Amino acid sequence: MTKKLFIKTYGCQMNVYDSARMADVLAPLGYVATPAPEDADMVILNTCHIREKATEKVFSELGRLREQRRDRKASGQDMIIAVAGCVAQAEGEEIMARAPYVDMVFGPQTYHALPEMVAQATRRTGGVLNTDFPLESKFDHLPEESAGQGVSAFLSVQEGCDKFCTFCVVPYTRGAEYSRTPEQILAEARRLVAGGAREITLLGQNVNAFHGQAADGTVWGLGRLIREMAGIAGLERIRYTTSHPRDMDDDLIAAHGEVPQLMPFLHLPVQSGSDRILAAMNRKHGADDYRRVVDRLRAARPDLALSSDFIVGFPGETDRDFADTLRLVTDIGYAQAYSFKYSARPGTPASGMDGQAPESAKSDRLAALQQLLNEQQIAFNRSTVGRTIPVLLDRRGKREGQLVGRSPHMQSVYLTAPDRLFGTVAEVCITDAFANSLTGGIVTGKHVHQPMERLSA
Ligand code: 5AD
Ligand code: SF4
């Protein structure tokens, strides 16, 4: 008998990947995806704890689900309500206490045990709480993926983090660094390509700390894994995210120059341009260390475009520290970047530090930083106008005849093109640039198709 499953995913790409794998684990139990929570026999909130009052968001969503379950019960149906992900890991006890109607609360390392948890929850012997960090890897117990992910796919190679940046919850919610084996990863990559993937993004909280041990005992770094993946026929593009500047080793840097499938775009978070703040953040690198890593990467791959994460208003950050951040941004020149106001996370060292900044100072700094980053992003996008670039057409647009793809530098490109080009890398002449996207036309011989006059994103 089929049952309906609704998973709501918050936060990072790792959660997107985890949600797909949870659906794989539940498929043999008869669960199929449904787009609406009110129709679902099971709802899983796959939560994020990195910033903001994420817990409160979860509780208000849970309140809504409780009412939807009441409606379903009135018509003789039921609903299992579950909270997964990093809020579950960090605040599991509190969820069970404040929302006792929740059936299952389980952390990111436990979802291979979902069938057992579902059996327990169905017996309704009270809620199930599972926030273990089991010694064996969940990856050893997960079934193979039941569905392909499409043209552009994610593959989790590494989880957890040992860096302990003082602002960050990840080492506590995701646990210690763990790498999957190269054999496991390559087999999954081949299945993804057989299922239609042309691009694979390797995922990990600290992906370039990857150190997978092969069956012959050798330990592979990310550079070796990428070189090996480049041998998979049909795989045209490889990316990886998210990296730590300290783990950019020589082999990985060299791979940027030597592996044509490795796309010339790198998300390499720096967080701050001030050595004083970087030290307080326990980042284990200074601003000049970061500049040097970027120089080496650009020496290997001159057209490499960069992205980063920044935190403004970290405890003790002065105007001078913030000016150092602006200077670093000016020196590096980013194609895009994410910036956040510092948010004190319970249990992290920085939450107890002196010099917590007022909200107004954080807002002012965020606005100034985002203005500079936006200017850089627009300038970068404009620099592509008039050029012909390879675009992987991985999505269908909202308009009739519209395809959407990604440039090598991760820019979204909107164009009109025949549907038979879907899933291929096409040569596209860029005709216009906006803050968050490009438009262009397919190049056939010397002829350029007319572009869309305006885009939808
Ligand atoms: N406050 C603000 N931003 C944070 N990040 C992580 N923890 C915090 C926090 N406590 C940001 C970092 C990280 C990104 C994923 O989220 O910039 O790189
Ligand atoms: Fe968090 Fe990234 Fe620092 Fe690890 S390296 S603690 S995931 S910010």
Image (tube, rainbow, N blue to C red):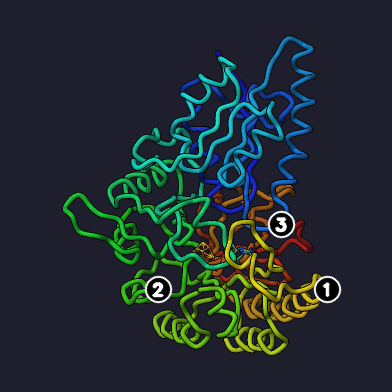
Residue lying at 51% horizontally and 49% vertically, measured from the top left: 151
Judge left or right: residue 138 versus residue 32. Answer: left
Question: Please, is residue 111 above or below residue 360 in the view?
Answer: above
Foreground residue among 110 and 253: 110
Residue found farthest to the left: 216
Residue lying at 32% horizontally and 54% vertically, measured from the top left: 232
Dot in front, 2 or 3:
3
The mark that comes first in sequence, 1 or 2, is 2
Which type of secondary structure does the marked residue at label 2 adopt? loop
Task: Give coordinates of residue 404: x percent, y percent.
Answer: 64, 55
The image quadrant that residue 258 belongs to is bottom left
Marks 1 and 3, how far apart in space?
A: 16 Å
The mark that comes first in sequence, 2 or 3, is 3
Task: Give coordinates of residue 440: x percent, y percent.
Answer: 66, 66
Residue identified by numbered label 1: 360
For residue 248, which numbered disc appears in the image? Answer: 2
Disc 1 residue crowd, few under 14, some 14–19, many 20+, Cα 10 Å: few
Which type of secondary structure does the marked residue at label 1 adopt? helix
The quadrant of the image that shows the C terminus is bottom right
Task: Give coordinates of residue 351: x percent, y percent.
Answer: 64, 65
Disc 2 residue crowd, few under 14, some 14–19, many 20+, Cα 10 Å: some
Judge left or right: residue 389 versus residue 353. Answer: left
The amino acid at mark 2 is Met
Foreground residue among 15 and 300: 15
The mark that comes first in sequence, 1 or 3, is 3
The quadrant of the image that shows the N terminus is top right
Foreground residue among 440 and 165: 165
Residue identified by numbered label 3: 52
Residue lying at 55% horizontally and 62% vertically, measured from the top left: 391
The amino acid at mark 3 is Glu
Q: Are marks 2 and 3 in contact (CB under 8 Å)?
A: no
